[in-house]
Amino acid sequence: MSIGDIQNHTEFMNADLNNKDLNIDQPSSSSVNESSQYLSIQQQYERQQMDYKRAHGEQQQQQQQQQQQQQQQQQTTSQAIPILPSSYQRGDNQLQTHEQIIDQHNMQSQQQQQFLQEQQSSVPRQLQRHDEHNQIITSKLPSKITKGKYSLKDFQLIRTLGTGSFGRVHLVRSIHNGRFYAMKVFRKRQVVKAKQIEHTNDERRILSVIQHPFITRMWGTFQDCKSIFMIMDYIEGGELFSLLRKSKTFPNQVAKFYAAEVLLALDYLHSKNIVYRDLKPENILLARSGHIKLTDFGFAKEVETKTYTLCGTPDYIAPEVIAVQPYNKAVDWWSFGILIYEMLAGTTPFYDPSPMKTYENITKCDLKFPINFQNDAISLLSGLITKDVTFRLGNLQNGVEDIKNHEWFKEVVWDNLLQGNIETPYEPNIPSGVGDSSQFEIYPEENYDYGNDTAIDEFGYLFPDF
């Protein structure tokens, strides 16, 4: 199915008191009557001054009371809805770690010293987590990674595929086997400054142990004095987000196909106790065959019970995350519902130009559907995009089976889909064949200064597995 075919299926949706001039004439000392008159006027003047001070004092008191009420209202609002940056663009991720709050208020200096000593140790540190009772749990991910080790000399740098807060993604080609790869580059200083050390190490550990047909594969890593590098599969078809913007909406069957493959990827991650936490069309790539590849595991986390971190894209964040409540894998099923809604409607259900209003809409969860939505789609989305996690599909007793067995997915043969035996609705246009990058935007190239081993490596000890 071409983009044009998809488009053909998408028709539908102080009060200020002034001490004014009292016009009091100065008395004449030559007359007793004038003196008496002067005293009378003086008394009137003093009385008026007292009245003024009393009125002015009452006004100040009223203003103070109003200010206190406004402060109380602001505090109440800030407790319910986090404060977001004044500028927001779709695709920006918000992050505020609960662990950082704990560190600021509870962690003693001795614990901080111990942490630094562990980081500087030559033996790689096992990843530690805290559960909802703040008890340390040990990660099931290996502390020592056996993936391939490379260097910049092993690759030919071709062009930039994308940019981010910490670095870039480049299209590269191996000088040994001629294959094309995507090389993610993180600037160490930016990662440390943004307090993303643990998330970056988590991403490497997670990608090193997962393997699924609908998830991008990591082949190896390396680092120099200034940057760390990940060598990933190169997926030529570009982002699902780009296809959705071109066609505006997807027909029901097209949205169902992509949603089904995303579901299988999420189910696999959850079976490994991994919460993805950043599902959105921008993080879904299309292979040449038209099948999806989930990418960008910067916010993925191994969670045995619950976690607290506020992260993700505002349009897709679950209400329990906004409320800074402990949460589990159910947040991915909320985002899954938002993804299906956006594919069918062309917009997310709680979108507002103001990010604060978006969060407020999510918290209220007043879900409305376009008139062209099918009843089974409305039923599924109502079960996924629900504020009460105890009623959210995917988080009930039968887990993901409640979603897979829903009426909306009744035509899907899940085993055939997993094996790639179902025809894809769309195949990306790859005019130049293998290594073609026409589906990606053009970015200005720079002098990247990669492979510099002469400078002092200030932060290398923080990334022992790279």
Image: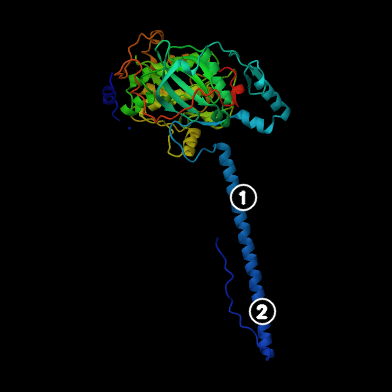
Q: State the image coordinates of residue 311 (x, y, percent, origin top left).
A: 53, 29
Q: State the image coordinates of residue 392 (x, y, percent, origin top left).
A: 50, 22
CA gap between label 2 and label 1 equals 39 Å
Figure quadrant of residue 377: top left
Q: Residue sitting at 62 percent across and 53 percent down?
A: 65
Which residue in the protein does label 2 denote?
42
Which numbered disc covers residue 293?
none
Q: State the image coordinates of residue 363 (x, y, percent, origin top left).
A: 51, 33
- Is 42 situated above or below 425? below
Closest to the observer, 169 or 262: 169
Closer to the N terminus: mark 2 or mark 1? 2
- Is 350 situated above or below 179? below
Residue 168 is left or right of residue 8, and the answer is: right
Say which element carries label 2. Answer: helix
Q: Quadrant of the C terminus?
A: top right
The amino acid beneath tag 1 is: Gln
- Is 76 situated above or below 444? below
Residue furthest to the bottom in view is 30
How crowded pointer 2 is (Cα within 10 Å; few <14, some 14-19, many 20+) is rated as some
Figure quadrant of residue 280: top left
The amino acid beneath tag 2 is: Gln
Residue 255 is left or right of residue 57, and the answer is: left
Marks counted in the figure total: 2
Asked if residue 80 shows in the view, the reply is yes
Q: Quadrant of the N terminus?
A: top left
Which numbered disc covers residue 68?
1
Asked if residue 385 shows in the view, the reply is no
Figure quadrant of residue 61: bottom right
How crowded pointer 1 is (Cα within 10 Å; few <14, some 14-19, many 20+) is rated as few
Say which element carries label 1. Answer: helix
Residue furthest to the right in view is 110
